[in-house]
Amino acid sequence: MALETSPESPTPVRTVLQLVGGWVAKLGRIWVEGQITELNRRAGTVYFTLRDPVANVSVRVVCPRAVCDAGGPAVIDGARVVVHAKPDFYINRGSFALSAFEIRPVGVGELLARLERLKQLLASEGVFNVERKRPLPFLPGTIGLICGRDSAAERDVLDNARRRWPAVRFKVENTAVQGTYAAGEVIDALARLDADRDVEVIIIARGGGSLEDLLAFSDEALVRAVAAARTPVVSAIGHEQDTPLLDYVADVRASTPTDAAKKTVPDVREQLTLVRQLRDRGRRCLSGRVEREVQWLTGIRSRPALADPVREVERQAEAIGTLRDRARRCLSSALDRASDDLSHTRGRLVALSPAATLERGYAVVQRPDESVVASAVEVKKDDELLVRFHDGRITVRADTI
């Protein structure tokens, strides 16, 4: 029930704290999972902070020393544990803490099972999909490197990268790579490098270690931060057999920090060799093409039409002369035949012509209208007639019939 208060009738602090303590006490005993930090043993009491492995929240835990010792030597700073405790609210100090009755270290098997569940959850959300992975640039201008301070991983990446390409530039962010604050520091460093426009690739590198040592690189918040980064990320955590969840979400997974340098930076010697080989190949291709074209041109020039073009003109002129002479012969023959035919026709015409008959002494009698008088009975007395000879004609009149 909410308290009914007013400026005139306020509630004392003790009442408020008593009510809060009563509400907290109703939770009863619960099991809580977290990571131990700030472990402090004082006489018969042990104090430590139980930090959430994902969110940046924590709670104070108080327990008898016997409870802590019963958990075994694994109860140390950075250890993952489950605690059976009762929430307590201390009214005198207004503070909240958990009173622990049992502490159980989280074993490797349980850690692996939880990591597997988290892996399945992230995979179902598409965080590990191959389609979202980005290719690395051929020659990045600046490479961001997240690693431990003065670590072997840092030396391996820098030395191998500069040996392969001496002009490569790095921007190094040193962070904790194991323990309570490792995931948070790596996330912050990733955000800084991702915001830098000069950084084209980010390498997250760490040497080998146990499952607990590499646990920070399976942190859900870190995995989601890498998935959201705009810059391609290379994961180089541990050795070949180590596979934290960061390896699945990174754009490129390297088996070791040395392998990360090889995958990120090209080898200048290999590139020079490749350029030389490509140049030689291009020269051979160009030379071969020129040689083929020269051979083709030589073959074209060797053809008769191009080797002796005047000869072709002469041959065509001879053909034209031959055709002209043939046409003349054909035309002359045709004219001769036509002339002969015409002579024969003229002879037949002359032979059949009335003028030829007249030349032999015959005459043709015609009327004035030039119609021929074929019989004497057709002529009447005093008719005017024309008598045609071969060399002219006369006019006569019929006197007697």
Image (spheres, grey):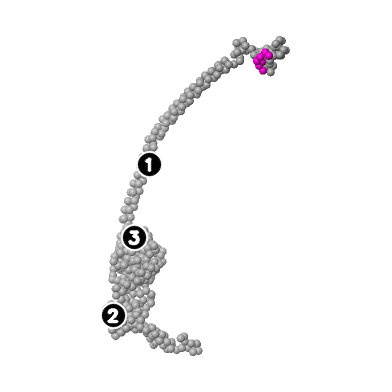
Query: Where residue 252 sits in the image (x, y, percent)?
Result: 35, 63
Q: CA distance from mark 1 to mark 2?
A: 87 Å
Query: Where residue 228 sits in the image (x, y, percent)?
Result: 40, 67
Along the viewing direction, whichever of 290 and 362 lies nearer the viewer: 362
Q: Is residue 81 magenta?
A: no
User: Where, by quadrant of the figure, is residue 62 drawn?
Assistant: bottom left
Q: Nearer the viewer, mark 3 or mark 1?
A: 1
Horizontal relation, residue 238 to residue 393: left or right: left
Quadrant of image for the C terminus:
top right
- The residue drawn where x is 68% and y is 15% is 378
Q: Nearer the viewer, mark 1 or mark 2?
A: 2
Along the viewing direction, whichever of 284 and 341 lies nearer the viewer: 341
Reading the image, the residue beneath label 1 is 293
Reply above or below: 350 against 28: above
Reading the image, the residue beneath label 2 is 71
Q: Quick check: marks 3 and 1 in contact, CB under 8 Å?
A: no
Q: How many marks?
A: 3
Horizontal relation, residue 94 to residue 71: left or right: right
Q: Main secondary structure of the magenta part?
A: loop
Disc 3 crowd rating (10 Å Cα; few below 14, some 14-19, many 20+) is many
| Residue 265 image label | 3
Q: Amino acid at mark 3?
A: Val
Query: Where residue 152 sits in the image (x, y, percent)?
Result: 29, 67
User: Where, by quadrant of the figure, is residue 174 drawn?
Assistant: bottom left
